[in-house]
Image: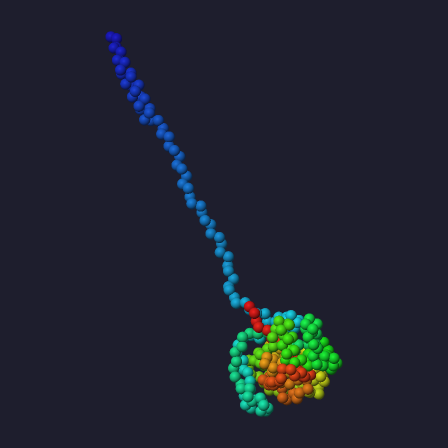
Amino acid sequence: MQRKPLPKIYFILATLLIFIVNCAKAPQVIEAPKPVEQPAQVIPKPVEPQPAVQPAQPQSTIIGKDGAEMILIPAGEFIMGVSRGETNIPYYEHLHRQKVFLNAFYIDRCEATNAQYKQFMDATGHAAPAYWNDEKFNQPNQPVVGVSWHDAVAYCKWAGKRLPTEAEWEKAARGIDGRMHPWGYRWGRTDRLKCNANAIDDGYQYTAPVGSFPNGASPYGVMDMLGNVGEWVAKSVVRGGGAWKDNPNRLFCASHVTYEPTITSSSHGFRCAQDVTP
Ligand SMILES: [Ca+2]
């Protein structure tokens, strides 16, 4: 018996069914996921250690325009003046022992010399002081003498400095503890050899080269604060308790004498001071 062929419609439907199934099986095109953009990574810089903030410390010594070494006298209180009975010279009993505070300052280690004063004269045309041609006093490293207070002020101004105040001079000479002399409180048997006064055996008949008595240095290392030459300070006062020709028994750091600012003497010189600038 001959099979009856399927109607053509079945082929069409079958073909259509296969197409639909294949379409369903066709691999889907899956787009690759877009990379997620990451924010740029910020790498922190290493923190450099910062030095601790320290206040600027002034140098312990400096060199002035005139070539003179200057010593730092630190800020703080010191004992100024003398009490009744500390000296047998009634003239000085008005000085009143008291505590005084001073800011830091610099002071010349030594008295101003003839060599330094010559620089000033050459630069400014300032007149020569008294005793300038006297061989007893005019060697280069001897302290300049015969200067008036006005001369001393002019020199300090040229050197970019100033005269010390009385309090500054006294603190530089005796330190903070109220001692009577740069090297100690009492005058010992050999202390006449610690400064150039009128002692027969200190080695100098007139002024000595500055800095010749290291054993007589002050607690800060300032030289010749007693003897050699008395020193002009601010307000026309001479400090130093005497000079090369004075009796050493009368020398002590708190002594002072006021003079006319125009007077000159072979016993009078000076040294300079300077503020501490940041
Ligand atoms: Ca002196």
x 42%, y 42%: residue: 37
Q: Which of 133 and 227 is in front in this view?
A: 133
> Is residue 150 visible in this depiction of the protein?
yes
Looking at the picture, does residue 180 appear above or below residue 153? below
> Is residue 252 visible in this depiction of the protein?
no
x 54%, y 90%: residue: 84
Location of residue 27 (image quadrant): top left
Location of residue 21 (image quadrant): top left
x 66%, y 87%: residue: 246
**Residue 113: image location, x then y, percent:** 68, 76
Location of residue 36 (image quadrant): top left
Looking at the picture, does residue 41 appear above or below residue 61? above
**Quadrant assignment for the N terminus:** top left
Looking at the picture, does residue 224 appear above or below residue 37? below
**Residue 248: image location, x then y, percent:** 65, 87
**Residue 261: image location, x then y, percent:** 63, 82
Q: How many marks?
A: 0
**Quadrant assignment for the C terminus:** bottom right
Looking at the picture, does residue 103 appear above or below residue 205? above
> How was the colour assigned to the protein in this rendering?
rainbow
**Residue 154: image location, x then y, percent:** 64, 75
Q: Nearer the viewer, residue 78 or 27?
A: 78
Q: In this view, does 188 lie to the left or right of 138?
A: left
x 54%, y 67%: residue: 56
Residue furthest to the top = 1
